[in-house]
Image (tube, helix red, strand yellow):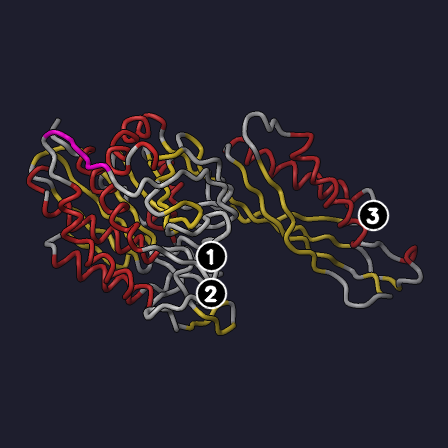
Amino acid sequence: MRLSTLALCVATLSGTFAPAVFANTPDAAKLTANVEQKVIEWRRDLHQHPELSNREFRTSKVIAQHLESLGLEVQTGVAHTGVVAILKGAKPGPLIGIRADMDALPVTEVVDLPFASKATDTYRGQTVGVMHACGHDTHVAMLMGVAENLVNAKDSLAGDVMFIFQPAEEGAPAGEEGGAELMLKEGLFAKRKPEQVFGMHVTSSLPTGVIGLRSGPAMASEDSFTITVKGRQTHGSRPWGGVDPIVASAQIINSVQTIISRQVDVTKAPAVVSFGAINGGIRSNIIPDEVELIGTIRTFDQDMRADIKVKLAEIAELSAKTLGATATTEIDAGYPVTVNNPELVAKMRPVIRSVVGEDNLIEPGLITGAEDFSYYALETPGLFYFLGVTPAGKDPATVASNHSPAFYVDESALKVGVQTMTQLALTALSAK
């Protein structure tokens, strides 16, 4: 997950989980109880051996070996290191997809665990620590458990399941393609498109076992931009002898703020344009030739997203021009808005509630972080939810967040994730 603060509403955990009761479907709770310890062991192994985006070689091998042991049709090397497996149910019916992301982050772990990561790798030319600081190790382990559950229940399935183990959710290395977009580009859904696709993400912003599910737009789109402002170098004591790109940059930064405050309908959906870096100049008495501005755009509406991009480039160009400078804008298109299909959410919300109970299913606020699960949900109805992993006695509002070197997962939450996803699949493929 490309992260910003997860502004999630927090509910009180009751401490027990209501059993799921659906006619003509296997008991997801019993299935999950049989794999719970395996899931924890897989998670610890993966946590101790994290791998960066598009480099998940060991991870994919662990996944493939398990799926093959279950007798599934397994394809490896998808979008570099992705793994895809198909489970055929006993009866004809739709195909559904379930996705887990695999990659870790260039973060040095500080959590004192017997299975803490000591791994290092090279990132942008530097040696860095590597850590599952966003919980993708748990996602992989839980989906491995769900796969085993559904194989054990396949005689009751009216339809098939596509298990998608996806690399590079955190973004492919510079100069490479990756993630959900590349999996789809390589034909993931070409032969047969799932009728529904499901995904889950752990978060420290919720107590252990609490589920956050929102209908409609749930997570923002993400686009990064670079504005190059060119002037003409001159001595700082003679500013009239050149064109000052620093002043022009200041004008651009101030004017861009009016896009959100004055030019888009924020009653339709919120949006954010933020500058994260300003690079230019080296001495107090030299006005440089060039300044670079770097920032991000976050929106919850695809049309608004496109409009903001146009306005950003226009404002940069015209603001610079009034001061005799030039400005060119390059936008690196990131992830689309993650939209949960309202009809699918309405159908499946009671299913999740049956597992966690009324008090432990909440509707979170909009999240300005981004997720490339959004690409799947553009192709077919999608449902993406959050699983709380902050243990009792800890305040989710103050604990280390996802992407922190101190990010911590309460492993007792994993059974909730496995059971909810298993029940969703059993319900989607029930004979009824």
Where residue 33 sits: x, y (%)? 16, 50
Please give the residue where the numbered disc 2 appears in the rendered image.
Answer: 107
Please give the residue where the numbered disc 3 appears in the rendered image.
Answer: 324
State the SS at label 2: loop
> Mark 3 or mark 2, which has the lower sequence index?
2
State the SS at label 1: loop
Q: Main secondary structure of the magenta part?
A: loop
The residues tagged by marks 3 and 1 sit, at their Cα atoms, a distance apart of 42 Å
User: Mark 3 or 2, which is nearer the eye?
Assistant: 2
Three-letter amino acid code at the position of disc 3: Gly
Q: What residue is drawn where x is 28% and y is 33%?
A: 353
Relative height, residue 245 to residue 363 (above, below)? below
Please give the residue where the numbered disc 1 appears in the rendered image.
Answer: 403
Relative height, residue 401 to residue 297 (above, below)? below
The residues tagged by marks 3 and 2 sit, at their Cα atoms, a distance apart of 43 Å
| 326 inside magenta stretch | no
Mark 1–mark 2 CB contact (< 8 Å): yes
